[in-house]
Image: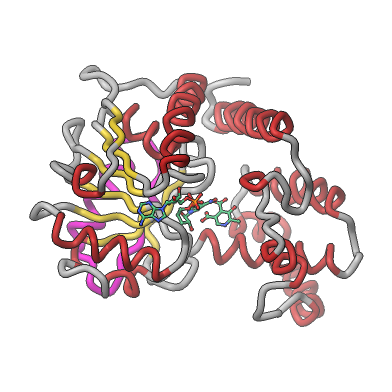
Amino acid sequence: MPDGTLTVAVIGLGTMGPGIIATLARGGMPVRAHDLSPAAVERARAAVPQAAAVLDRLGVAPPTTGEGAVSFHDDLAGAVAGAGLVIENVPEKVEVKAAVYRALDPLLPAGTIVASDTSGIPITTLQGFLSHPERLVGMHWSNPPHIIPMIEVIAGEKTAPATVAFITDLVRSLKLLPVVVKKDVPGFVENRILYALLREAIDLVDQGVIDEEGLDTCVSWGIGYKLSVVGPMRLLDMAGLDIYQSVAGFLNADLSARRDVAGYVTERTRAGKLGIKSGEGIFPYTPDQIAALQAERARRLVAVRRILEGRDG
Ligand SMILES: NC(=O)C1=CN([C@@H]2O[C@H](COP(=O)(O)OP(=O)(O)OC[C@H]3O[C@@H](n4cnc5c(N)ncnc54)[C@H](O)[C@@H]3O)[C@@H](O)[C@H]2O)C=CC1
Ligand SMILES: Cc1ncc(C(=O)O)c(C(=O)O)c1O
């Protein structure tokens, strides 16, 4: 059972690392952070306190023992020394994660749990790279991880039930919402749903049915707004299953079923247009616009979460 004395190592400090570190430290845990890239470490040193400031606005208080200390380590061995939990947050490429697990394997103290924040690589695949696969579990946070309260917990074929319980207890101790995924399918649950939506969204823009601005307005103020209050299963009940039966009867066959990644995305990634991390993706961004977009996203998510939790409004 995790408690405030659990030390956590976070490996990979890109988009996800800093918010995860701030959340764990606010929960009272000492956090030891490591990234191969000195530039990523420097960005994380600035981003962790920014995420902590958002936790203040969310009203997340540390335990009576106080906030955990955050330390940065140049080497993997230094980062995992004394850790009871290692959270792996490196890029979504099997070969990159495999190299990290092979390097971690001889360094792990007996009993240390390893959690992967993979977006959808089956945990069973990753278990092949560790000599104690029973201690590896999926812990899939959502971006921005210090604000989105739901965390998927995924067992691979060899994950011990005690490992799943350790992570679900930890998530609950942070007053967040663990969702245990019952089968280790690619993409788990959240990203199977998100990527079904994204495939259709990209296809609609690519076909000229709607432009990018219109697509974002339609989804954010239509289904996005609604789904934050009523999940898909209850939404079906409120719309009427007979309506779904009729519409799905002609619509499902017309929806995008493409199996590859659309050229709309591939052409941009090949050109280095990766989104805010490279200054341009679907839209171009100046540094000021990136800062404003991130601040506005945090402001709105905090406001909505407080209302949905019944704390404001
Ligand atoms: N970006 C997102 O919205 C989300 C991403 N994820 C998942 O979380 C993981 C990390 O994603 P991001 O933070 O977006 O990636 P990122 O590319 O922003 O950051 C990854 C970091 O890992 C570092 N790294 C690479 N190899 C390393 C190694 N051998 N040792 C230590 N550090 C190393 C890189 O220097 C980089 O700073 C991925 O598996 C991703 O699929 C999960 C939820 C949301
Ligand atoms: C595009 C995209 N892909 C993966 C994820 C994830 O949850 O792993 C996210 C996210 O928002 O968290 C995402 O936006």
Quarter placement of the C terminus? top right
Q: Is residue 200 rendered to the left or right of residue 28? A: right
Q: Position of residue 150 (x, y in %)?
A: 46, 46
Magenta stretch: residue 17 in it?
Answer: no
Quadrant housing residue 33: top left
Reply above or below: 7 against 119: above
| Residue at image coords 10%, 52% | 109
Numbered range of the magenta stretch: 154-179
Reply above or below: 238 against 72: below
Front residue of 264/168: it is 264
| Residue at image coords 27%, 22% | 63
Quarter of image, ligand 2: bottom right
Q: Position of residue 20 (x, y in %)?
A: 40, 39
Magenta stretch: residue 162 in it?
Answer: yes
| Residue at image coords 19%, 41% | 2
Total of numbered circles in the picture? 0
Q: Is residue 22 rendered to the left or right of residue 215? A: left
Q: Position of residue 259 (x, y in %)?
A: 65, 80
